[in-house]
Amino acid sequence: MTGTLYLVGVGPGDPELLTLKAARLLGTVPVIAYPLTGEGSALARDIAAPHLNPAAIHIPAALPMSVERGPAQAAYDAAAAAILDHLRAGRDVAWLCEGDPLFYGSAMYLVSRVATEATVAVIPGITSLTAAAAAIGRPLAARNETLKVLPAPLPDDVLRHELALAPAVAIIKVGRHFDRIRALLAETGHAAGAVVVEHATTTRQRITPLADFAHAERPYFSTILCYRGDEAWGAVA
Amino acid sequence: MTGTLYLVGVGPGDPELLTLKAARLLGTVPVIAYPLTGEGSALARDIAAPHLNPAAIHIPAALPMSVERGPAQAAYDAAAAAILDHLRAGRDVAWLCEGDPLFYGSAMYLVSRVATEATVAVIPGITSLTAAAAAIGRPLAARNETLKVLPAPLPDDVLRHELALAPAVAIIKVGRHFDRIRALLAETGHAAGAVVVEHATTTRQRITPLADFAHAERPYFSTILCYRGDEAWGAVA
């Protein structure tokens, strides 16, 4: 009677943006595991905190952010081993994921270590992308537009190519790449229509047109949505 | 004391995949509006049904699917007028949206008619995209991959261009374009790694590798996710 590993999307930050399904599961699951995101801090756990089974066993996992093959392998091996102990004992485990588990998450590295022995089920979550669009209040994409999601660490030439002529673009993982991204957006005609959303759906949420972003400032936990003009907003096609 | 118009994402189909925030709002809001999707049927209303305030006034809106400028304008004008009557009387209105309100929805056509008089707030929802990935159990995108969302009605040359070399692609609005899409995916090397998800998260959910899809068959309410090989699934970068 091996337990099931649930990958649970806890959404972008607002604890009310978990799904009913995620909240129900987290209220009863006996083991909860999550990545540590700093000294004793764990963003996914903090988001889910109001909904967690108070009697649950916690497995915090120290996973390297910047992935080097050796240390990352060892860290995921250790987390998977701790989770497998509970699954083998018949206890279900919920692995908490910011946003959605399969949208640029790292849960897949755990799954590959667990799926040979146990069932894995995924509960989708609200992504940072739709959360950012909701905060701004303008469509992420509409009608028959292509939507591109571009991770900021991509090389300049790839970003430049994908940004050219793209009607709707979302830049994720901005972090330390902000200056590069700002320059590339200017170069490809997106600077005027780009909006920076920081800490979407939390009490620290801030929405700033890219053009108004102070020169020396850097955004935190941000997504940049790029719009071309106002034509997609409100007019019937 | 004008009311607020809430655009509420009701998710992909499973009534448990609404957010806690959406369920809380829908349990108390005095007016609920939604698009009709057929003879008396309304998919977004059906998904949200278990959570609706039983005393709510309902505003079903007949909106044309294939948008022709004149009739569509008149239909949205009429829906907006009915909603504005309630907002002006101080009653909040929830407009139900399948999936997420700002991810390829038509809610924006209402907003443009209402936003000059009333506040509009958006509650994001689980998209058909993350729901499809959850059903398959493989990442939609990972690491620093570009993710492209392509509406199937786009012209062949645009689709061909965007599909070429794309690591992760999701095709939405497949419908009557299935044969064209299948041919284009074969042409661009995506046929072997493409998976068709129908009715994601509902009791009618069906997952079929594109290569196994019967020749004369057509998928319903489907999203096609395209994966390149297995390299994104499980290996630490």
Image: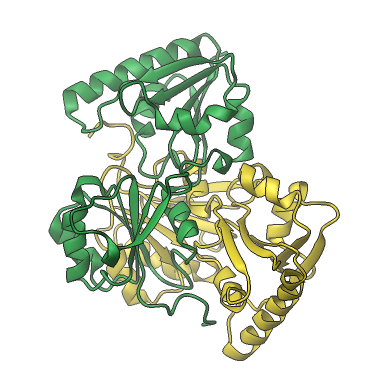
Chain colours: A yellow, B green
Residue extending furthest toward the bottom: A70
Q: Is residue A219 visible?
A: no
Q: Position of residue B120 (x, y in %)?
A: 49, 28
Name the quarter where the N terminus of chain B is drawn.
top right
Reply above or below: A111 against B157.
below
Q: Residue at x 27, y 20 (%)?
A: B75
Depth check, front residue: A97 or B136: B136
Q: Position of residue A151 (x, y in %)?
A: 44, 67
Image position, residue A21 (x, y; %)? 62, 46
**Residue A97 at what x, y percent from top left?**
62, 61
> From the viewer's perspective, is B176 left or right of A86?
left
> In the displayed structure, does residue B76 sit left or right of residue A237?
right
Which residue occupies 39% across, 66% down? A183
Q: Is residue B161 visible?
A: yes
- Residue A26 or residue B71, whichever sits in front: A26
Q: Is residue B87 above or below residue B170?
A: above
Q: Is residue A30 left or right of residue A190?
A: right
